[in-house]
């Protein structure tokens, strides 16, 4: 099959009635690794959530398609079936649902897309074997599968659980939102190796990160900088290195009007209850 392309065109997204993404365009082909970097509050997570169909993120303009199929028309589970995966910046705990049970349902629903509600899951024995193998590769204790999803997990455990899910679902496009946050260097290496092992001609990757550190391990071919809801700069891996060296100040200086929008937004949030999230 021909390589799929995730095409985002002039995407505009509102959160709580406020325009956050102000026209983002980006094309990712299967097999490519892209990184979006940018100061906090720029809208990186907003892009990720909007692509996955989070109800709090309202698309008010633009398109997002995979090989011409309109993603924005689809419910989140349908987007997952279309091949999009999001590893969350802040994974949610689901007490009462074990990691194994959650993953078995997720994997079944992706691999048997026309499965009827309540129909058989993929066979336990087969799934267990696969789960054990993938957990082994991520250096996870097998006991982990019996714990409730993200319930009391450390930052590193949450991120590993996201990558475990990625490795079982094998999407066409994986969006990794700040997968490095909360990881010590060993966990960072394990998680990055996991992503590198999975990436290849079959998977396009969008790595979202504030820091360059992760990009020492997951090497993007394309790097984009987001500032106040727009992608203002695009380049190769060297762009990430420039950001590491010089920080974001030169980007702000190069786009003073856009940087000002970000400052105004931050000031407005500082005086309201919005923006309590990290
Ligand atoms: P980044 O991931 O680049 O740090 P976000 O996409 O999280 O940025 O946030 C962009 C802007 O949108 C910020 O001003 C943030 O406060 C606001 N925002 C995002 N999500 C929400 C939300 N659920 N509720 C309120 N404001 C939000
Ligand atoms: Mg974010």
Image (tube, helix red, strand yellow):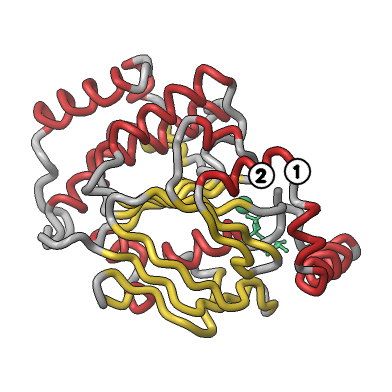
Residue hosting label 1: 246
- Name the residue nearer the viewer: 143 or 58: 58
x and y percent of residue 114 in the render? 12, 62
Q: Is residue 98 above or below residue 105?
A: above
Residue hosting label 2: 242
Quarter where residue 124 is shown: top left
Q: Is mark 1 within 8 Å of ligand 1?
A: no
Labels 2 & 1 near each other (Cβ < 8 A): yes
Q: Is residue 226 above or below residue 208?
A: below
Task: Specify few, some or many for label 1: CA neighbours under 10 Å numbering under 14, 14-19, or 20 or more.
Answer: few
Q: Secondary structure at mark 1?
A: helix
For the point 65% across and 72% down, which residue is it? 20
- Name the residue nearer the viewer: 255 or 25: 255
Would residue 271 be seen by someone viewing this image from the given angle?
A: yes
For the point 39% across and 48% down, which residue is it? 33
Q: Is residue 140 left or right of residue 152?
A: left
């Amino acid at each position: 099959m021909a390589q799929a392309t995730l095409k985002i065109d002039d995407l505009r997204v509102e959160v709580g009635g406020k325009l956050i993404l102000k026209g983002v365009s980006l094309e990712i082909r299967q097999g490519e690794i892209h990184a979006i970097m940018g100061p906090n509050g720029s809208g990186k997570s907003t892009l990720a959530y909007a692509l996955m169909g989070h109800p709090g993120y309202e698309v008010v303009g633009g398109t997002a398609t995979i090989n011409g199929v309109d993603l924005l028309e689809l419910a989140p589970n349908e987007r997952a079936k279309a091949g999009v995966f999001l590893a969350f910046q802040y994974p949610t705990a689901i007490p009462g649902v074990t990691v194994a049970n959650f993953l078995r349902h997720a994997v079944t629903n992706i691999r048997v897309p026309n499965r009827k509600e309540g129909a058989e899951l993929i066979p336990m024995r087969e799934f267990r074997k696969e789960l054990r193998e993938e957990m082994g590769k991520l250096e996870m204790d097998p006991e982990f599968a019996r714990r409730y999803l993200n319930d009391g997990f450390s930052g590193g455990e949450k991120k590993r659980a996201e990558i475990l899910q990625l490795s079982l679902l094998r999407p066409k496009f994986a969006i990794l939102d700040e997968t490095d946050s909360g990881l010590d260097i060993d966990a960072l290496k394990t998680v990055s190796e996991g992503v590198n092992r999975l990436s290849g001609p079959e998977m396009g990757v969008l790595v979202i990160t504030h820091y360059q550190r992760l990009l020492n391990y997951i090497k993007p071919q394309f790097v984009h900088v987001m500032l106040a809801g727009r992608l203002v700069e695009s380049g190769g891996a060297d762009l990430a290195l420039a950001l590491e060296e010089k920080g974001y100040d030169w980007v702000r200086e190069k786009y003073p009007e856009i940087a000002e929008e970000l400052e105004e937004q931050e000031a407005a949030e500082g005086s309201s209850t919005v923006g309590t999230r990290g």
